[in-house]
């Protein structure tokens, strides 16, 4: 058996594994805060129904997303999941998961309190 060739293969495989491990990880960044996703006046009557969260994300290759990613879609997802008319005390977070040099996943997560408007209850 050719010993230098086997050593070269092992060294190449080790370097490839080290490169993959050194370029993988995750990043988290706060995206913002908002009192609500819709304007609420003092005449509006609503009931808080509980916590809500939603997200939107896409696989990325070489830093380019395969599908569009938006905060609006994450908000709509949170409202749909909780049956809410509006989210209050909203926070947004951006996350990127790096799986190796060419491939990553970008995600926007929105969290807040779900609320439903009570129609005809205001003055």
Image (cartoon, helix red, strand yellow):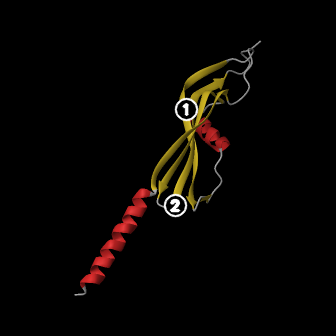
Q: Nearer the viewer, residue 102 or 16?
A: 16
Of badges 2 and 1, the one in the foreground is: 2
Q: CA distance from mark 2 to mark 1?
A: 30 Å
The quadrant where residue 63 appears: bottom right
Q: In the picture shown, does residue 118 fall above or below 31? A: above
Q: Earlier in the sequence, mark 2 or mark 1?
A: 1
Residue shown at 62%/31% (left/top)?
A: 84
Give the side of residue 98 with respect to residue 75, left or right.
Answer: left
User: Left of 121 or right of it: where is 8?
Assistant: left
User: Residue 103, position in %: x, y?
Assistant: 51, 61
Disc 1 packing (10 Å; few <14; some 14–19; many ≥20): many
> Which residue is the site of mark 2?
103
Q: Is residue 53 rendered to the left or right of residue 116? A: left
Farthest-out residue, top = 123
Q: Residue furthest right?
A: 123
Please name the residue shown 47% across and 48% down the image: 26
The total of numbered circles placed on residues is 2
Q: Secondary structure at mark 1?
A: strand
Q: Badge 2, how many Cα within 10 Å: few under 14, some, many 20+? A: some
Q: Is 26 or 43 nearer to us in this picture?
A: 26
Instruction: Please name the residue shown 68% across and 21% down the image.
Output: 118
Above or below 19: residue 13: below
> Circle 1 sits on which residue?
52
Q: Secondary structure at mark 2?
A: strand
Quarter of the picture holding the N terminus: bottom left
Could you say where residue 61 lies in the image, as x and y percent from the top left?
57, 62
122 left or right, relative to 62: right
Residue at 28% of width from left, 80% of height from top? 6
Q: Residue furthest front?
A: 4
Vertical placement of 67 versus 11: above or below? above
- Disc 2, disc 1: CB below 8 Å? no
């Amino acid at each position: 058996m050719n010993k230098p060739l086997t050593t070269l293969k092992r060294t190449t495989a080790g370097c490839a594994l080290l490169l993959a491990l050194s370029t993988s990880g995750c990043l988290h960044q706060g995206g913002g805060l908002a009192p609500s996703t819709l304007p609420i006046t003092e005449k509006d009557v609503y009931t808080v129904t509980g916590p809500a969260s939603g997200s939107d994300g896409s696989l990325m290759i070489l830093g380019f997303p395969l599908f569009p990613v938006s905060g609006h879609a994450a908000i709509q997802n949170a409202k749909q999941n909780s049956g809410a008319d509006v989210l209050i005390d909203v926070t947004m977070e951006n996350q990127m998961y790096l799986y190796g040099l060419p491939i990553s996943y970008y995600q926007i997560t929105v969290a807040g309190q779900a609320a439903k408007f009570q129609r005809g209850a205001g003055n």
